[in-house]
Amino acid sequence: MGLRALSGDAEQARNADAEPRYAEELQKAQIKEPEFYDRLAEERKYFYHVDLLGRLYLEDMLPKNIATSLKSPKFLNFFFTRLRPNELGEFEEYPFVSPCGKEMNYIRPADTPIVFDKLEKDEKDGKEYLYYAADMKEPFDPSLLEWAADTDRLYYPVRNHKRMKGHRALVRSHLAVQLSQNFVLDGDDIYLDWNGDQHLIKLVH
């Protein structure tokens, strides 16, 4: 489903959150034997998965749903603050890591490790922010939204995270649907009408 579908049929677009169910089936095939996780746990190496909704799980946790996801706000902020690309030269199928003292946490996301799941205005400074993890945030600039035509997903660049700056983060489907209510179609271009201005949504690959 592309951005045109989101803007043209809001009811159909609300079904976009069904996509994670198919992604979970793919993730099941990546789970290793229990002996792998037990052996690496002795070395204090742990393996995680971030789904398309931005929820964090131990990789071998099944089923994956809101009840089995890791939800402690303190832990989530701690974990994602330390997020960075995996440049360790091992377990390269896990493109990101989050070191914690002597522990090393390896992350293989369904798409991107950071997933923005809400957009809100901060009452203190009056600015709009995209939120992820527990309450980590990035300032929202509507001119920076990007659409990947090959996956029909909406993204936003990470700018404030010290170790993830320049990486692209997924905009969760329900938030993309909300934003789509302000899409304006002009030929082959799609704009976001936001606070009285129209911003071109960039096409990326």
Image (cartoon, rainbow, N blue to C red):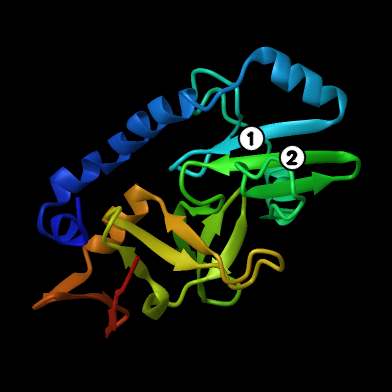
Q: For mark 1, what is the residue?
A: 48
Q: Residue at x 21, y 60 (%)?
A: 3
In the image, residue 100 above or below residue 147: above
Image spot of residue 108 (x, y percent): 58, 41
Q: Secondary structure at mark 1?
A: strand
- Whether tag 2 and tag 1 are in contact, CB under 8 A, the answer is yes
* Apparent side of residue 128 relative to residue 137 in the rendered image (left or right): left
Q: Residue at x 65, y 45 (%)?
A: 92
Image spot of residue 197 (x, y percent): 28, 85
Image quadrant of residue 32?
A: top right
Label 2 Cα crowd, 10 Å radius (few <14 / some 14-19 / many 20+): some
Q: Residue at x 28, y 80 (%)?
A: 200
Q: For mark 2, what is the residue?
A: 105
Image spot of residue 72 (x, y percent): 68, 36
Image spot of residue 94 (x, y percent): 62, 43
- Viewer-side residue, 85 vs 49: 85
Label 1 Cα crowd, 10 Å radius (few <14 / some 14-19 / many 20+): many
Amino acid found under the numbered disc labelled 2: Asn
